[in-house]
Image (cartoon, rainbow, N blue to C red):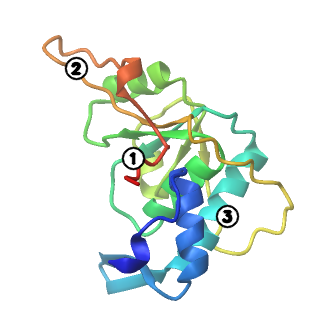
Amino acid sequence: MEFMKASSPGSVISRFIEVARQYPEHTAVRYRDQLGWHAQSCDQLLAAARNTARTLAAKGLARGQSVLVPSLRHERLCADLLGILWAGGNFVFIDPNYPAERQRFLCEQAQAKFGIGPAHWRAEVELAVDWIAVKDEPDESGVPVPPDDPELPCYIIFTSGSTGTPYWRTSALLTRQLLIPG
């Protein structure tokens, strides 16, 4: 697709903002729920991601800090992931089907202080995080969204290898820098 070609290398967030501003009415996300298919334009996704970023910034998310995200498909997932990155955090997917003890272990290992995701999942396992509720309305709080840093981690992947105990290494930290061939 022609409109997805990057004009210059940068971060995931800076590139998304560039594309969303250039093509605000293009479809960014299509998803299906129990009511049928829905679409979200680039402009709508940009606004929703900005709301997530401002909400996390207002709550005190530190740059490079992990945010737990349940690995469930839902209508705010893309906006939440982009918002976490935009606010300077990184995300750690946590599988709701994991045993409670494993979920707690991953939360502790990632040193996550915040979680973001569907309300129906939050109560299933008590994790030591502040669950963030993002409103789908314009955020007028005035909290500045910090500039994106392409060198910060994007997300953390946990693996258990042959040990059965989850762990992560620096090599499992994926940065948000886009590698775009010249």
Residues under numbered marks 2 and 3 in contact, where contact means CB atoms less than 8 Å apart: no
* Residue 170 against residue 138 in the figure, above or below: above
Per the image, the residue denoted by label 3 is 51
Q: Mark 1 falls on what kind of element?
A: strand
Q: Residue 70, labelled with which disc?
A: 1
Q: Position of residue 6 (x, y in %)?
A: 46, 64
Q: Is residue 9 left or right of residue 163?
A: right
164 or 125, nearer to the observer:
164
Quadrant (top left/top right/bottom left/bottom right) for the C terminus: bottom left
Whole-angstrom CA distance, mark 3 to mark 1, is 19 Å
Point out the residue furthest to the left here: 162
State the SS at label 3. Answer: helix
In the image, what residue type sits under mark 2?
Ser
Please, what is the three-letter code of the amino acid marked with disc 1? Answer: Pro
Choose top left, top right, bottom left or bottom right for residue 169: top left
Q: Locate residue 55 relative to residue 95 in the image: left or right.
A: right
In the image, residue 32 lies at what x, y percent? 30, 78
Badge 1: residue crowd in 10 Å (few <14, some 14–19, many ≥20): many
Q: Which residue does the image show at 56% across and 34% down from the upper left?
A: 151
Write down the residue under mark 2.
160
Q: Earlier in the sequence, mark 2 or mark 1?
A: 1
The picture places residue 54, in percent across and down from the top left corner, at 72, 56
- In the picture, measured across the screen, residue 71 lies left or right of residue 107, that is left
Q: Residue at x 35, y 26 (%)?
A: 172
